[in-house]
Image (cartoon, rainbow, N blue to C red):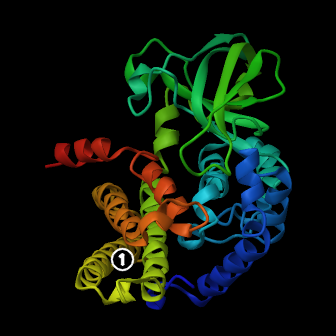
Amino acid sequence: MTYQTNESLWEPEHQIFRQTVRDFIAREVDPNVDAWVEQYEVPRSFYRKAAEAGILGVDIPEEYGGPGGDFLHRLVIAEEIGYSVSGASMSTSLIADGTSEILYRSANEEQRRRFLPGMIAGEYLFGLAITEPDSGSDVSGLRTTAVRDGDEYVITGSKTYITQANTADAFMVAARTGPDAGSKGLSMIIVEADRPGFNRGRLLHKMGTKASNTGEISFDEVRVPVANLLGEEGKGMRIALGGVNMDRITWPLVAHAASQRAFDETVEFVKNRKGFGQTIFDFQNTQFKLAEMKTELAVGRAFLDDIIRDYKANGTLDTMKCAMAKIWLPEMEARVIDQCVQLHGGAGYMDEYPVSRLYTAARLHRIFAGTTEIMKLLIGRSL
């Protein structure tokens, strides 16, 4: 099975890259993902192999060790990892590579040269640390502080639901550096994990995407040089949100691709499964449900294609369209995959069938990178 895309949207280089990603997933992910699920993390060697295949930091210029591609290369990865059943267990681990894009966009020249080559080589892993125990989407409630003391910041606080918490070598940490309330007093600071006072907390066990590391970290008066500040003081949320539209189109693409894979698996299953003297496919109810799903998939794909077409023409992503995509596509995914599980019957509840892993992974997509409710608030305020 392969994910069918609108070829007119992609340049030949993107189609060649798509095959590279497919081959990499088949070679390095599919045979190993069950072991990673048991370990609750992807081994560091995976990132070195991903680097060798040219799929880390795909849009980072060659002068910093990157392949020199563009954002569309990242979207290709999103589609292919979304369509892969293995991707349902580890998609966050690979797409977390987006930290290289954040660093490239917001770092100064010294920081770029210090961190990017190692990140893109898969030797130096970064995490993004924003969410705290008492605040998630509401950044105004962040309590971690970074107090200036000469040429250093002293950082105190804790973070949770952090991807790569147990494995990352450094984190981009959102911390309060000024007295201003809300997001205006927040800055983004790089904190290396080997600094005194940095602590890794619990490994958190998740409903799905289990082949990825998610956990807690804390800072007990961790001292870092002021040179680790990304951008300017008080501009931390601008840095974090600078790529928010990219996230809000990436995860809808993952959601659509995963829905399409669940649909394809289900069509094959019902055509081979028999009940009451005929295949499950032969029942009118089955055909009606599949027809509804196929229609929703076509509508979702058309919307995504429209956003990508606009991006190619203008070089920017429409904020409202991305927010609408982040609402509709994961909600569609929930409807489609739920029906796919139902058409599988008892088999759909078993992890040996792809639809089961796709189902539990899908629940994250309505939360990750901005909840459905937050997207509705954004759209409502624009009216």
Crowding near pointer 1: few (<14 within 10 Å), some, many (20+)?
many
* Residue 121 in view: no
Q: Quadrant of residue 139?
A: top left
Q: Residue furthest front?
A: 276
Residue 318 placement: quadrant? bottom left
Image mark count? 1
Residue 343 horizontal/vertical position (percent)? 37, 72
Tell which of 291 and 68 is nearer to you. 291
Q: Label 1, secondary structure: give it.
A: helix
User: Would residue 181 appear left or right of 288 to someone viewing this image?
Assistant: right
- The quadrant in which the N terminus is found is bottom right
Compared to residue 173, the image places residue 220 above or below, namely above
Position in image of residue 214 (x %, y %)? 64, 39
The residue shown at (45%, 56%) is 362
Residue at x 67% of width, y 25% of height: 217
Q: Nearer the viewer, residue 35 or 172?
A: 35
Figure check: 257 above or below 239: below
Please indicate, yes or no, whether residue 374 appears anywhere in the rendered image: yes
Q: Residue at x 46, y 64 (%)?
A: 346
Q: Position of residue 370 (x, y in %)?
A: 40, 44
Residue wearing tag 1:
301
In this view of the protein, which residue sits in the foreground, 14 or 337?
A: 337
Q: Position of residue 117 (x, y in %)?
A: 81, 54
What amino acid type should be assigned to the residue bearing mark 1?
A: Arg
Residue 236 shown left or right of residue 316 in the figure: right
Q: Is residue 175 left or right of residue 285?
A: right
